[in-house]
Image (tube, rainbow, N blue to C red):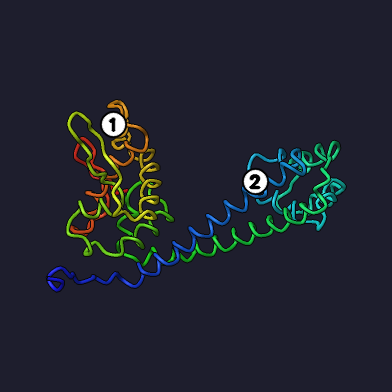
Amino acid sequence: MAKDALQKVVSAPVVNDKLKRLSRRRRQLVNDKVRVANRIQSDLQAVCPELLAITNKLSNLWFLRFLTCRNDLTQLARLQRSTLLKVHGIGQKYASIIQQWQRKASFSSEAEYVGPMIISDAKRILELLSQIHILDEALAELADRSVLACRIASIGGFGKTCVAELAGEIGTTQRFSGESSLALYLGMSPLSKDSGQHHGSKCPRQVNHRAKAAMMTAVARHIDHVSESKVYYDKKRTEGKKHNQAVRALGRHLVRVIWSMVKNERDYELRTPGGDTNVT
C-alpha cells in the first residue's frame, strides 16, 4: 500500500533551486531589517523623539548615515553644516532640516547607554541593505536564465523579486497534477467551508506561505498595470469581497494563465478588442 501511495519527486532546474535559496535568504534579511528598524524607532522615541521626526522614513540612507557618523549620539546636535554636507546623501535641504533640529535638540538621560545601541542598529541596517542589494543583483541574473521566471516576468506588474521568489518556490510545474493543484500551493484557492445556511471559505494548510506572499504582492501590483485586471478586481469589490479576497480571486485566474503559458511555451499577452496582440 505504501509503495502505491509513493510518488516520484520531480527535480526542479538547478537555476530555480538557486532562486529558491537566494530568495529565502533575501526574505530573512528583509525581516531582520524590519525588526531592527522597529527597535531603533522605539529607542529613538525614548531618547530623542525630535531626532526621529526629522525623517518620515527610518530607512532613508542619509538618515542612517547621519546616525552613524559619530560614536556618541549627542554629538549629532553639535555638527557643523560643512560636516553635515560631507555625509553621503545629505545635501543643502537635509542639512537645513538637521540644523533646525539642532537648535532645539535635547536628549533623555538614557542617551548615555541607549545611544550606542541606536548607532549599532543603524550600522546593522546599512549592512543588511548592502547584503540585500547584492542578493537582488544575483537574483536578477539568475532569473534571466530561468525559463519559468522569464515566463512569469512577462506578466505586467510582476516585479523581479516576486518573480524570483515564485520561480524558486514553484521549481517546476511538473510537480503539480494540474493548475488547481498549483493554485492551492500558491494560496490562491481557498477551501469551501459551507455548512447549511452558512457560506464561507478557509485557508488551506497545503500552502507555501513564501510563494503566497510573493503572489499576493505581484497580483496587487498587476492590477495597476492591466486595465482588464483592474475591472475584474473592481467587480469583485462591488460583490462585497474584501481587498485580499479580490486579489486572491484575480490571483486564481492568473494561476490558470501561468499554467497555460508554461504548457504552451508562450509569454503573457494582452489582446485588444480589435484583435491586436500586445506582448507585455
Q: Indicate the position of residue 51 as horizontal and vertical percent values.
A: 75, 42
Mark 1 lies on residue: 236
Front-most of residues 163 and 115: 115
What residue sits 24% from the left and 38% below the top?
Answer: 272
User: In the visual, does 144 lie left or right of 191?
Assistant: right
Front-most of residues 155 and 24: 24
Q: Quadrant of the N terminus?
A: bottom left
User: In the visual, does 215 lie left or right of 1?
Assistant: right
Residue 203 placement: quadrant: top left
What separation in Å lies between label 1 and label 2 (alpha carbons)? 36 Å
**Amino acid type, callout 1:** Lys
Residue 223 placement: quadrant: top left
Front-most of residues 279 and 6: 6
Quick one: label 1 or label 2, which is nearer the N terminus? 2
Q: Indicate the position of residue 187 as horizontal and vertical percent values.
A: 31, 49
What residue sits 35% from the left and 46% below the top?
Answer: 156
Q: Indicate the position of residue 26 as horizontal and vertical percent values.
A: 49, 61
What residue sits 17% from the left and 56% below the top?
Answer: 178
Q: Which SS class for mark 1?
A: helix
Residue 100 vertical placement versus 205 (above, below): above
Mark 1 crowd level (few <14, some 14–19, many ≥20, 10 Å Cα): some
What residue sits 30% from the left and 32% below the top?
Answer: 231
Mark 2 lies on residue: 58
**Amino acid type, callout 2:** Leu
Front-most of residues 256 and 95: 256
Q: Which SS class for mark 2?
A: loop
Q: Indicate the position of residue 140 as horizontal and vertical percent values.
A: 44, 62
